[in-house]
Amino acid sequence: MASYKIKWKTSAKKELKRLDKKAIIRLLEAIESLANNPYPAGVKKLVNSGDSYRIRVGEYRIIYEIQSSVLIIYIIKIGSRQNIYK
């Protein structure tokens, strides 16, 4: 199986930089694992959002979009569960 390429939205990078160091490490590990398996255990497809999915990493959520035809995953948004859906 081919590996997906990870691309970041600029705002998602900024959101990640605002978090504490331990959370950043855990989130980056989860994002890197998406390259090999874009549908890990616990993934949820977001309602009314096309090809957008979310995964939980502790109290944080990663919203991403999968483009299977070109093997790209776009990281759209990262944040705590209280603020991610607003």
Image (cartoon, rainbow, N blue to C red):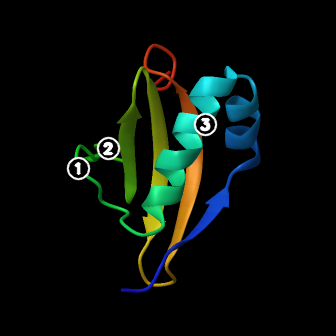
Q: Single out the mark in the foreground, 2 or 3.
A: 3
Give the residue at x 48% y 78%. 3
- Neighbour class for label 3 at 10 Å: few (<14), some, many (≥20)? few
Q: Single out the mark in the foreground, 1 or 2.
A: 1
Q: Are marks 1 and 2 in contact (CB under 8 Å)?
A: no
Sequence order check, earlier mark of 1 and 3: 3
Q: Amino acid at mark 3?
A: Ile
| Residue wearing tag 2 | 46
Q: Amino acid at mark 1?
A: Ala
Q: Are marks 1 and 3 in contact (CB under 8 Å)?
A: no
Measured Cα–Cα span from mark 2 to mark 3: 25 Å
| Residue wearing tag 3 | 25
Sequence order check, earlier mark of 1 and 2: 1
Residue 67 position in % (x across, y down): 46, 72
Give the residue at x 73% y 41%. 13
Give the residue at x 58% y 26%. 23
- Which residue appears farthest toward the top when viewing the image? 82
Quarter of the image with the N terminus is: bottom left
- Neighbour class for label 2 at 10 Å: few (<14), some, many (≥20)? some
Residue 35 position in % (x across, y down): 48, 67
| Residue wearing tag 1 | 41
Q: Single out the mark in the foreground, 1 or 3.
A: 3
Measured Cα–Cα span from mark 1 to mark 3: 20 Å
Residue 18 position in % (x across, y down): 74, 23
Q: Is disc 3 placed on a helix, strand or loop?
A: helix
Q: Which of these two is toward me, 84 or 35?
A: 35
- Neighbour class for label 1 at 10 Å: few (<14), some, many (≥20)? few
Q: Are marks 2 and 3 in contact (CB under 8 Å)?
A: no
Q: Amino acid at mark 2?
A: Leu
Q: Is disc 2 placed on a helix, strand or loop?
A: loop
